[in-house]
Amino acid sequence: MDAKDILGLPKTPLSVPPEKKSQPKKDSQRKPDGISREVYALTGGLAPLMPSIDSSYLKKRPPSDEKITWQWLPFTNSARKDTLQLYHWVRVVNGVPPTGDYSFAKYNKSIEVTKYTDEEYAQHLTDPSWTKQETDQLFDLCEQFDLRFVIIADRFPSSRTMEELKDRYYSVCRSILLARASSPADVSGHPLVKENYNASQEKERKRALSMVLSQTKQQEKKDAEVLAEAKKIAESRMAAKGVEESVMPATENEFPETTIDHNDTLVSLSNVRLAPVAVPPSTLVIADTSSTLASLRMLPVYLRTYALEQMVQQASSSAGLRTIKRVEQTLQDLGINLKPRVPTKAVCAEHLELRKEILTLLNLQKQLQYKEAEGSSLREGTTYSEMPGTPKRQVRDHDRTFIPDAMSFGGERGGRKDQKRKGPGRVSETPSSPANKRPRKMKASDL
Amino acid sequence: MTNSSSPKRNEQDQPETSGPVLKSLKTKLSKPEDAEKKNLSKKFKDVEISVPIVYGNIAFWLGKKANEYQSHKWTVYVRGATNEDTRGVIKKVVFQLHSSFNNPTRVVESPPFELSEQGWGEFEIAITLHFHSDVCEKPLSLYHQLKLYPEDESTSLSIKKPVVVESYDEIVFPEPSESFLARVQNHPAVNVPRLPVGLTFPTPAEDPSERKRGDTKDHPLSQWFTNFSEADELLQLAAARQQVQTHIAKLRRQITVIEGQQQQLKPSSDQ
């Protein structure tokens, strides 16, 4: 159809006469003009790919050679046990009513509940906590309610928990299976034989599930925090493990608990797992140190020099390579070995502290440089880009835009030299029209 | 290396407590086999045991007797830093030599943990320390570059004065097991920190069969051993820190001064 359209040939007579209405002709005529063109363009071309059922098609439907009548006839349902006879409308073609079963009978499926004889009961199925009568009742209910244990538990005359009922049912079925099997190998594939029903596990599982469902929002938040922390610890352990592969692969027998045991009360989880790392993740630096410490503690044994290396690495993690070189240079200038000659616990601690202090020193030096550069640029009016990490600067800029004109350049002028060109690249401070413009603008918008 | 005999016994100074102490421990726990198992598996998280060691080599030039393939006689070793016996901790040491040596994997099963050889080349030796099972299951590796020739090339080789290169390090056990802790409480080669309150161990009975000396106090080469003192290093570090701290304070003052100056330039409307 489409191809013919493209080729410009007239449409095939699928929906074209014998219809007098000639609706499709209308379609192809509409093709080039009118709103319908866009509509047809939407369909990815000028004609729909799928033949749509338009009203002409529907009208055409009734085939003329068949004689159709509708009759009110009785029918039987094979799914029914009784002989109730109902009536319904039936489409009769040429006087022949349809054959076959009631079309919905095939949906009458039921679960096959095992039946045991009395001898079998006596032989295999006796149980101290269950009488035969109870067991029979249970099985009747199972059959009646298609193993819907929620209903069965509700209907069961004596009060038994659902787990008990399930336990009894499954163990009976299992015993029967095993008893009736000609050889154990036959039934070993059966799911009941392979994995037996475990009542206590089910109880536990359901309890845990209900707990999770009934958590308050607060608890949810707490749990998320704990999990994130555990994940962090796990990652640092992984990192340590990767590093340690050649030296000391750590044993991780407690590890799976953190990931799998989500069902457990996470309060106990946090108590157990996070006790060694009792540091709230307040500042990033502290958390990282504790994770390095934690990863070290995971190792069964390590060398002091190795530990120092790790701590130094962690401390310099925020610094770039150049900064690290500068730290080392400073250490050498101070006459300190880059790696202590006698790495005892005390010496290593001191060394680490010294390194951290040198880092602070270098940062302060940098800060001082920036400040001095700022100061000098203010005085000389040279342009420069704003320095990062100096929030005061930003605040001042904001203030400047909102301060009414008198104060803003009254202050500047009063300070140092007069003419200020583009100070921090924001406001032009020349005491002529641009400056005036700015406050005026503010005033206009403010009012 | 021959062990010189001497009446000194104080390297094994675990006092000779008799059976009753040990027995009482066992009766307290009522099930001996369980107690042992518990001892082995129980670990202490807050107690960190460290064993300071020194490892390195001493090399003597053979002088006239030297030939192309054997110019030096050297010994590589691991010893306790204070020359005390490390036997309670280290079970055996494996020295991995250059592949050109016969049987390059040399195992030393009793202290003193050392190995002597003759050769001409300098190479890296992998020293693997194996610990007793209740100390640590995993071995620990150290690496030492064998040094035969003196650093200063102008120094003439002498038969009498060897080239000595030693490195100090500490083996740290962050979570020692109970039996290990009990065993080494008063061990001279081991640093045990102050135990938390309430945690005490009965001192184990000394095993009379283990009388052979494993310390290196009277080692023939002991005259060449370096004495590693942490005091010097601590002093150095303290002095350096002092310097840095003063510098930091000075910088901080400078920064505040400048900030103050810059503040004056602007009106005081900002905080």
Image (cartoon, coloured by chain):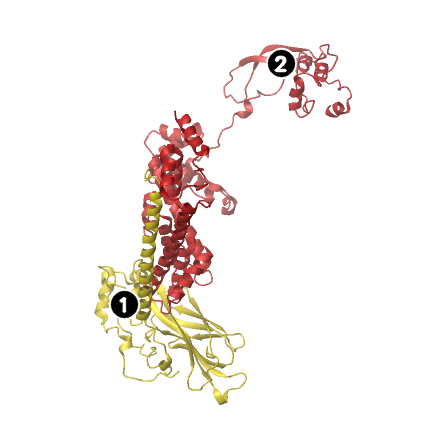
Chain colours: A red, B yellow
Q: Judge whether residue A91 can be spotted in this image.
A: yes
Q: Judge whether residue A254 can be spotted in this image.
A: no
The image quadrant that residue B43 belongs to is bottom left
Question: Where A107 falls versus B121 (above or below)?
Answer: above
Inspect the image, locate mark 1, and give the three-letter code of the amino acid beneath it.
Gln
Question: Where A253 falls versus A386 (above or below)?
Answer: below
The 10 Å Cα crowd at callout 1, few under 14, some 14 to 19, many 20 or more, is: many
Task: Pinpoint the chain carrying mark 2.
Answer: A
The 10 Å Cα crowd at callout 2, few under 14, some 14 to 19, many 20 or more, is: some
Q: CA distance from mark 1 to mark 2?
A: 99 Å
Q: Nearer the viewer, residue A395 or A127?
A: A395
Q: Secondary structure at mark 2?
A: strand
Disc assigned to residue A91: 2
On screen, residue B196 versus residue A339, left or right, reads left
The residue most toward the bottom is B64
On screen, residue B223 versus residue A65, left or right, reads left
Q: Residue A218 in the image: state x and y as whole percent.
A: 33, 37
Task: Pinpoint the chain carrying mark 1.
Answer: B
Inspect the image, locate mark 2, and give the three-letter code of the amino acid beneath it.
Arg
Question: Where A320 falls versus A65 (above or below)?
Answer: below
Disc assigned to residue B185: 1
